Image (cartoon, coloured by chain):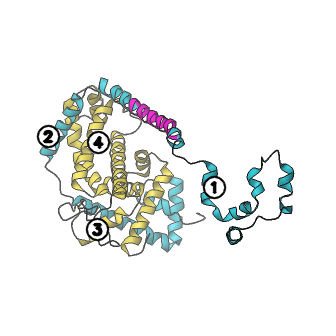
Amino acid sequence: MFAKHPETALIPYLRGELGADERSRVESHLQTCARCRASMESSASMLREISEKVAQIPEPDWTRYRAQLRIRLAARREQPQTWWRPAYSWMSLAAAGAVAATIVATIAIRPTQQLGPTPPVDQLALEDAPADLGLLRDYPVVEHLDLLENYDEISNLDQFAPAPSRNEKSSS
Amino acid sequence: MEFSDEELCRQVAGGDTVAFDALVERYQARAYRLACSILGNEADARDVSQDAFIRLYEAAGRFDERSKFSTWFHRILVNLCIDHQRRNRWWRKMVPIGKRDDDPDAPEIDFPSDAPGPDVEVIQGESAGRLRGALDKLSANQRAAVLMQAEEGFTSREIAQVLGCSEATARVHVHRGIAALKKILKGEEP
């Protein structure tokens, strides 16, 4: 007996494809399973319907069909296949090489194009973050610092008095 | 004296065009019908079935007679049909066909419809049209397996040889294909 329904064996059973063992197991299952009997019958009906519809496909003019086939075959045989295939592969290799060379050239040229017009990094930083610069402007000492040599001043920056703001400067 | 398919194929391998013509005449209707029922289009079926005969001519020397000639030839044919459909689907995904419902201003591209039109409807009648539509919803392997079973009376083993899969897998393709067809024709999604 089958542990579950022998669904995939039903059509082969119907067509007489199964070996003796499998056939007898399907037969005994079908005796007790109405669902599989119904499934087998509806599948057979579906296959018959497909077969009938396909038989209605109008046939082409076979003389013309064979004439077209002969022309296509002759055209194919006339192609000098002994040389065009290698030539084709060489062309493919050449095309791949050209693409690779273009990519390499693009990568090589790109940095030099960017170096010229690119503004200095500190200028960019000033443009991008003006709001953060108020503190630095308040401490003029910072402008004169060489960072490594004046480490003491940097570490004690909070002890310096802030410089007068621009408003205070203009009022005074 | 009538030669077997296998004998004719050996003669084709030796360059015998008369043997090739004999094989074409013997298989043209079956090849065309199967291609037509897989592709749903007469023009494609003609081109692809002719392609299969050209491949047969070129590859006859490689037929090793481990399977029947008909199985070997159908393998060429079905693979060409499946390749043809894959190429078409890829192309149609890349280029929108017709006017899109969600974009009324989109330019309409007048490509031939995927569905068989009145001039290319290969299976006549309303029920046949529904069957054609249902077949189109199956996977390529399921559709080929069901059609080979229905049209050619191929066994599961022969279907497996054509599709290049195990016999158990071929049985599953047929079973699932038929089950899906039943559901689609009842108005349920598979």
Q: Please give the range of residues in magenta.
A: A93-110
Q: Which residue is mark 3?
A: B99
Mark 4 or 3, nearer chain start:
4
| Circles 4 and 3 on the same subunit | yes
Residue B121 sits above or below residue B183 on the image = above
The part of the image, by quadrant, that contains residue A39 is bottom left
* Chain identifier matching the cyan colour in the rendered picture: A
Residue B69 sits above or below residue A44 on the image = above
Looking at this view, name the residue that lies furthest to the bottom.
B187
Q: Which residue is mark 2?
A: A67
Quarter of the image with the N terminus of chain A is bottom right
Q: CA distance from mark 4 to mark 3?
A: 35 Å
Q: Which residue is mark 4?
A: B52
Disc 3 crowd, CA 10 A, few/some/many (<14, 14-19, 20+) = some
Q: Nearer the viewer, mark 3 or mark 1?
A: 1
Kind of residue at badge 4: Ala
Q: Which residue is mark 1?
A: A125
